[in-house]
Amino acid sequence: MNRLSIQSLPLIQSSTDVSLPTDQLLHLPERVLQFGTGVLLRGLPDYLIDKANRQGIFNGRIVVVKSTDGGDMSAFARQDNLYTLCIRGVENKKLVEENVVCSAISRVLSAKQQWDEILRVATSPDLHIVISNTTEVGIQLVQDDIRQSSPESFPGKLLAVLYARYQAFNGDPTKGLVIVPTELIPNNGTKLAAILLELAHQNTLEAAFIDWLTTANTCCNSLVDRIVPGRPDAATYQAISEQLGYEDELLTISEVYRLWAIEGDEHVLNVLSFHKADENIFIRPNIDQFRELKLRLLNGTHTLSCGLAYLSGFETVREAMDDEVLSAFVSSVMLAELIPGIPYTVDEKIAQRFGFHVLDRFRNPFIEHRWLAITMQYSAKMQMRNIPTLLHYYKQLNVTPRYITLGFAAYLLFMRATSQQDGVWYGERAGETYPIQDAQAGYFADVWARLTPEELVKTVLQNTTLWDHDLSQLPGFADSVASYLNQMIENDVLATVAAHFDHIETVTK
């Protein structure tokens, strides 16, 4: 079987199962410098740039910097930096299976062995953009000498690149770069800009450069969202390889859903012209809306559903979405209650569209997301993701949100510990134990041991240490939670939800 490379492209040209690059795409100028070789970058930003190139919009390739010793660069060299992205999932309730050979990467350079070449890229007039994903640890201030080859930290390397560019163009203000970190931390661009400035002072760089650094360059806050598991297991890889007709050491799986939200002005919009290629790239003056949508709708729905779904006997998100009752609950809690409860001004149409995308993601048969994993630090997640939504829902509508209440009651039942072993508390489901991986597990073990369900609900809701608010003051909330909790204990969790759906209007797509 052929290995993916430029030379082998004509040999697999007849395949109808993969979208291949044209020769023209392999010779575009290098307009992006990227720090990181990970699957998230290949599965989202690099894929989107490749998509724009195919549409004749961006017309630029990416030089990738590999900063760490781990991993293998040779696969990129053997395959002429080509890789296959296999997109699998559900979109608009339809199954999607798409294979694309991405050609956006032109070179992969080692920071330790090819630093001089990286600095030459920094001085190229074609270069306009820097992208990074160096894990959350990457955006940190460390003592770093940017004159060494190469600097230790990612901010140190980036500052050295910018300094080399400043010197090459004699401080030309039009030669600054648009820098888009994709590390999964809030305000990643703002934090990176502050670290670069501090490092510049620590390295006693001249005042004129510091002025150029802060005025000619733009560090953008950004938010990326796409599940990219990476290389599949051996059996799946073999099946895909046989389908495609070639071997690919860099073959990567991703879900269909994609989001890249970037904070920027008109200048950023013009430089990042690849945004025109995909409706899921958003460049806005403020991207807090997208962060709120992800936190409240995707993460919040997971948190309100995980205990309920797990105690109903479902192991994975997809299994629950295949059940009529659980699927209706998930859709209803998100669309009917979490959207109107978002404690931030959002466009309702954008929120609804985001919610429908989330439901498609939950239905993805190619992604195995286990409910028990979602219950980790359940209490902290409930407080951060859902309590602000609950409070805002009451403020807006002044009625008890039934679906949120059902989810909260199931959370309390999940936290009922029946045993402890080696410092870990365990609950029980259908005669089998499960770990309660929560910093508040001991507290809940105590209140469950000595209080009735009604007393427990009142005590927990009044615990301002947990919630920062006295939730027992919300009209009707304590009584509703206690009622649902008793029904779940006396009957069955899934039956309790199903019974309430007999007279609660469901919201579905």
Image (cartoon, helix red, strand yellow):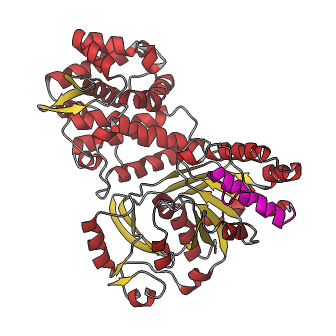
Up-down relation of residue 301 to residue 151 (above or below): above
Residue pictured at 72% horizontal, 54% vertical: 146
Residue at horizontal 33 percent and vertical 58 percent from the top:
93
Q: Position of residue 272 (x, y in %)?
A: 66, 62
Q: Is residue 119 above or below residue 459?
A: below
398 or 386, which lies in front? 386
Residue 490 vertical placement versus 223 (above, below): above
**Front-lying residue, 265 or 187:** 187
Q: Say left or right for 26 vs 332.
A: right
Residue in the picture at 24% in, 37% down: 310
Choose top left, top right, bottom left or bottom right for residue 88.
bottom left
Residue bounds of the magenta highlight: 148-170
Q: Quadrant of the N terminus?
A: bottom left
Whether residue 171 sits left or right of residue 9 in the image: it is: right
Where does residue 42 sit, x and y in percent of width and height? 49, 64
- Residue 166 can be seen, yes or no: yes
